[in-house]
């Protein structure tokens, strides 16, 4: 069974650019969540997708957007990058159905540096 | 979201039990108590969760106070590989994990 994978591992962008991060969920998982983790802090929830629809969003501006595909893989897009967007971006998948509280399985993350 | 309070750091000796406390006085009746840990340079890893009763799995035990306002994660025999940041999280109807700053566990050889 393949775990959650993310690509790329590292990425360097300049302020104002756009970036797309990718996540492949664990087999059989239909829910994907994205988190931002600044250095020295705990992960912060960005949003969650369940069966290709957004199913909850944290306190992030609209320039953070996402997609989930029919195979349940997902993308996180960030437009107009700012220096504060530099962080580790984590993807987590779960076999959740509505009303359940299953654990989430995290990928290793993508380290984004904005210069 | 209901919040949790954890000590910033704790130390333990290798092969001794470790009790990591968490206070969650504003927990609601439908909130589950989840624990995750994050090893250096890795994504968080699920450890255990519970609602009202104490729980055991291969990694740890979770002891939940009768009033559910606090809980304790128990590692029965700490190893050097258990050195990590441990997060106590209330997982409720919003179905999103709200991480705090966690407890940095140092295991001494």
Image (cartoon, helix red, strand yellow):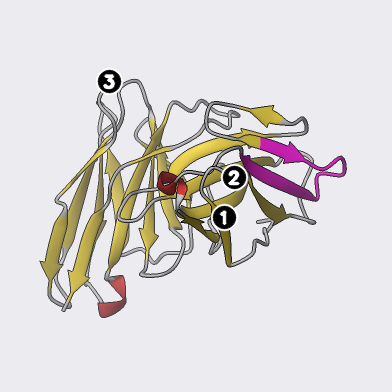
Please give the name of the residue rendered at 42% of the width and 48% of the height, measured from the top-left corner.
Answer: B80
Asked whether the viewer can see residue B15, the reply is yes
Q: Residues within 10 Å of mark 2 (few under 14, many from 20)?
A: few
Please give the name of the residue rendered at 27% of the width and 51% of the height, measured from the top-left corner.
Answer: A109
Please give the name of the residue rendered at 28% of the width and 47% of the height, measured from the top-left corner.
Answer: A108
| Image mark for residue A62 | none
Q: Are marks 1 and 2 on the same chain?
A: yes
Residue A34 falls inside the magenta stretch: no
- Tell me which corner region of the image, top left, top right, bottom left or bottom right, holds residue B93: top right
In front: A103, or A32? A103
Which chain contains the residue that carries disc 1? Answer: B
Q: Are marks 1 and 3 in contact (CB under 8 Å)?
A: no
- Residue at image mark 2: B16
- The quarter of the picture where the N terminus of chain B appears is bottom right
- Residue at image mark 1: B12
Q: Position of residue B78 (x, y in %)?
A: 53, 44
Q: Magenta stretch?
A: B62-75
Which chain contains the residue that carries disc 3? Answer: A
Above or below, A83 against A19 in this view is: below
Distance from the alpha carbon under mark 1 to that under mark 3: 34 Å
Residue B69 falls inside the magenta stretch: yes
Q: Secondary structure at mark 2?
A: loop
Q: Are marks 1 and 2 in contact (CB under 8 Å)?
A: yes
In front: A39, or A89? A39
- Residue at image mark 3: A1
């Amino acid at each position: 069974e393949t775990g959650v994978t993310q690509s790329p591992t590292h990425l360097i962008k300049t302020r104002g650019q756009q970036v797309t991060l990718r996540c492949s969920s664990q087999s059989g998982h239909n829910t994907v969540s994205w988190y931002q983790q600044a250095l020295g802090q705990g992960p912060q929830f960005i949003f969650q997708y369940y069966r290709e629809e957004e199913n909850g969003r944290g306190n992030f501006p609209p320039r953070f957007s996402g997609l989930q595909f029919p195979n349940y893989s997902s993308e996180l897009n960030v437009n107009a990058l700012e220096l504060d967007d530099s962080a580790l971006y984590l993807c987590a998948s779960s076999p959740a159905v509505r009303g359940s509280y299953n654990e989430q399985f995290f990928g290793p993350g993508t380290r984004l540096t904005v210069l | 979201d209901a919040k949790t309070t954890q000590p910033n750091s704790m130390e333990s000796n290798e092969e001794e039990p470790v009790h990591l406390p968490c206070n969650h006085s504003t927990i609601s009746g439908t909130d589950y108590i989840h624990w995750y840990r994050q090893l250096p340079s890795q994504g968080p890893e699920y450890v255990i969760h519970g609602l009202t009763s104490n729980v055991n799995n291969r990694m740890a035990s979770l002891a939940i106070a009768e009033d559910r306002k606090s809980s304790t994660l128990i590692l029965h025999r700490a190893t050097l590989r258990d050195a990590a940041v441990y997060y106590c999280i209330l997982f409720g109807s919003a179905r999103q994990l709200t991480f705090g700053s966690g407890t940095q566990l140092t295991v001494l050889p």
